[in-house]
Image (cartoon, rainbow, N blue to C red):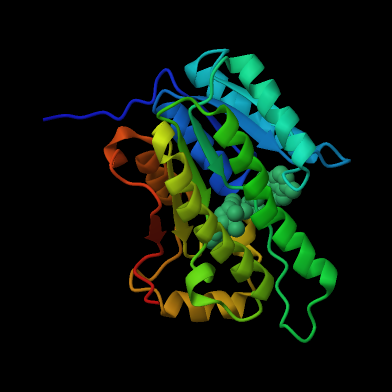
């Protein structure tokens, strides 16, 4: 028996979709037939716009001119997120899947952590997900799916990550509440919690820490972005039609 996962004619919005896990998720969902709205953080130098445009080009070359488009918005800003949803729905005429992937890391032990380091991570990694989920609740088609990208840190609490672990465990709580609240619209809300993934963020971990972490992973290596995006595809597809409010841990068997 052969089986293919098809998301057509659905539309997916991915926050922070210009690089890393977000970029690979855009490529994976597009390969499964979704049209994709790629969100990027509008930095002054225009670097993120370029990255998002490169992902759009890759997808439209493979799947046609209407298969992808880029939309700027800082997820920390509720008004920008609301405007981005309006623009994406205007462009694609529907919205079925939202992947809340945008996130930052500002590690520091608690005694040294500045208020700015605390707030910037909470604002991006938790409030950013709230802003997007609120818009998703208002605009997703019945049968829609929300997938929130959390982290192993939410349940293990890695050293130096008071801000990050607090935000990511907040995302897991938010996921469970929204699963209950949106079930009557048949909108499923789940989370994926990666271990360490080889992206710019994963590579920013100091080499010695990376080596120590790798020793604790039964599979003995970090994840490739594809291995996270394919679990996101599972949660976005009907293969997971009876799952909501869950967290899938994708971490090479790291025990917690
Ligand atoms: P990355 O640093 O390569 O990409 C993060 C993306 O988020 C970038 O495109 C960035 O521009 C965007 N972003 C940051 N702030 C934003 C804002 N205010 N508004 C809009 N976009 C914003 O990181 P990576 O590794 O791809 O991470 C993606 C998600 O996966 C994050 O939520 C991260 O916390 C999570 N994660 C990553 C792990 C890793 O080892 N790389 C492990 C566990 C979770």
Indicate left or right for 224 with 114 as reference: left
In the rendered view, tell whether residue 120 sits above or below residue 78: below
**Picture quadrant where residue 80 is located:** top right
Which residue is at 62% across, 26% downward?
56
Q: Quadrant of the N terminus?
A: top left
Q: Quadrant of the C terminus?
A: bottom left
Indicate left or right for 67 with 104 as reference: left
Which residue is at 48% across, 25% downward?
141
In the rendered view, tell whether residue 199 sits above or below residue 241: below
In the rendered view, tell whether residue 193 sits above or below residue 87: below
Question: Which residue is more in the foreground, 242 or 87?
Answer: 242
Which residue is at 58% across, 16% downward?
92
Question: Which residue is more in the foreground, 37 or 147?
Answer: 147
Check the image and name the residue furthest to the left.
1
Indicate left or right for 150 with 40 as reference: left
Q: In the image, residue 179 lies at what x, y percent?
A: 44, 47
Q: In the image, residue 240 lies at what x, y percent?
A: 30, 41
Which residue is at 43% across, 36% downward?
187
Q: Is residue 188 visible?
A: yes
Q: In the image, residue 171 lies at what x, y percent?
A: 56, 57
Question: Which residue is more in the foreground, 125 or 187?
Answer: 187
**Picture quadrant where residue 120 is located:** bottom right
Question: Which residue is more in the foreground, 48 or 62?
Answer: 48
Q: In the image, residue 76 lies at what x, y percent?
A: 75, 48
In the rendered view, tell whether residue 207 sits above or below residue 121: below
Marker count (numbered): 0
């Amino acid at each position: 028996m052969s089986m293919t996962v098809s998301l057509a004619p659905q539309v997916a919005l991915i926050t922070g979709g210009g690089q890393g896990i977000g970029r690979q998720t855009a490529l994976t969902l597009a390969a499964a037939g979704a049209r994709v709205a790629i969100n990027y953080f509008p930095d002054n130098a225009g670097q993120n716009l370029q990255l998002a445009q490169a992902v759009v080009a890759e997808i439209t070359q493979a799947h046609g001119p209407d298969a992808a488009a880029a939309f700027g918005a800082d997820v920390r800003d509720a008004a920008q997120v609301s405007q981005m949803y309006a623009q994406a729905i205007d462009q694609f005429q529907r919205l079925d899947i939202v992947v809340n992937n945008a996130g930052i890391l500002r590690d520091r032990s608690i005694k040294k952590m500045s208020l700015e380091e605390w707030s910037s991570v909470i604002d991006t990694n938790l409030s950013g997900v709230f802003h997007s989920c609120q818009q998703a609740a208002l605009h997703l088609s019945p049968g829609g799916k929300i997938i929130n990208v959390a982290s192993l840190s939410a349940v293990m609490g890695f050293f130096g990550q008071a801000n990050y672990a607090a935000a990511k465990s907040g995302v897991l709580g938010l996921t469970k509440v929204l699963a209950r609240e949106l079930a009557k619209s048949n909108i499923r809300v789940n989370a994926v919690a990666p271990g360490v993934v080889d992206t710019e963020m994963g590579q920013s971990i100091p080499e010695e820490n990376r080596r120590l972490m790798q020793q604790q992973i039964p599979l003995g290596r970090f994840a490739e972005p594809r291995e996270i995006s394919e679990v996101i595809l599972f949660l976005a597809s009907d293969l997971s039609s009876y799952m909501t409010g869950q967290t899938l841990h994708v971490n090479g068997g790291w025990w917690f």
